Image (spheres, rainbow, N blue to C red):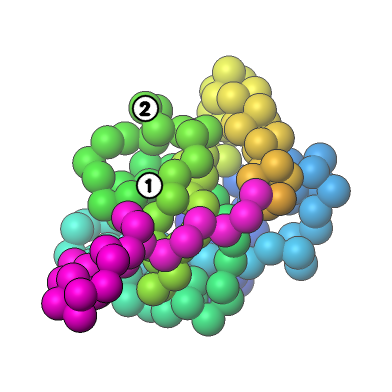
Amino acid sequence: GADEDAQGLPFVGRAGQLLNQMLGELGLAREDVFIANVLKSRPPGNRDPLPLQNAACEPYLFEQVRLIEPRVVCNLGNFATKLLTGSPTGITKVRGTPQVQELGGRPVFLLPLFHPAAALRTPAVKETLRADFATIPALLERPLPSPVPSAEEIAEAEAEGGSTPPP
């Protein structure tokens, strides 16, 4: 957005204020979380990102995840959801349901959430977002999922005569 572009920081406009408010309702401050954008620069005219732009920025986002080592990643909105889940399924169908995903080479709980900008436009979406946000503390308490072995790791274990690692 324009405010974010001007300040060089994510979620500092009205949507960011709502995000801060909802974090506060959980007893979290902005400083307690790391906020990043999928795209590292604003598309011309603030249009929707193109697949090529998402692909160009993906390695930077995954490196941020690798360095930060989060337990939970809350992806806000349709574009982030599709990128991070690797699925074309939209936010409306998957929002509020935690998934185990590997991001930045490590397993995380991925929690798809409506984008705060959508919540500013629609009161019902705002209440849904608030309810989904309320699930974050319990998700933070859950033990991290075990890494899923790669096909190469499974083949290597089988070749060595050992048992196959659990999926």
**In the rendered view of the protein, which quadrant contains the C terminus?**
bottom left
Query: Quick one: 70 or 78, which is closer to the camera?
Result: 70
Image location of residue 72, percent across then percent down = 58, 56
Q: Is tag 1's residue or tag 2's residue first in the polypeptide sequence?
A: 1
Relative to residue 65, is residue 70 drawn left or right?
Answer: right
The residue under label 2 is 93
Magenta span includes 166: yes
Image location of residue 138, percent across then percent down = 70, 42
Magenta span includes 156: yes
Q: Residue 42, can we see it?
A: no
Relative to residue 80, is residue 125 drawn left or right?
Answer: right
Q: Which residue lies furthest to the front in this view?
A: 161
Kind of residue at badge 1: Thr
Q: Is residue 166 above or below residue 76?
A: below
Dividing the picture into quarters, in which one does residue 134 lie?
top right
Kind of residue at badge 2: Lys
Query: Quick one: 58 or 146, which is closer to the camera?
Result: 146
Q: How crowded is mark 2: few (under 14 residues within 10 Å), some or many (20 or more)?
A: few
Image location of residue 38, percent across then percent down = 40, 63
Query: Quick one: 56 or 11, which is closer to the camera?
Result: 56
Q: Residue 15, can we see it?
A: yes
**Residue drawn 32% across the image and 64% down it:** 165
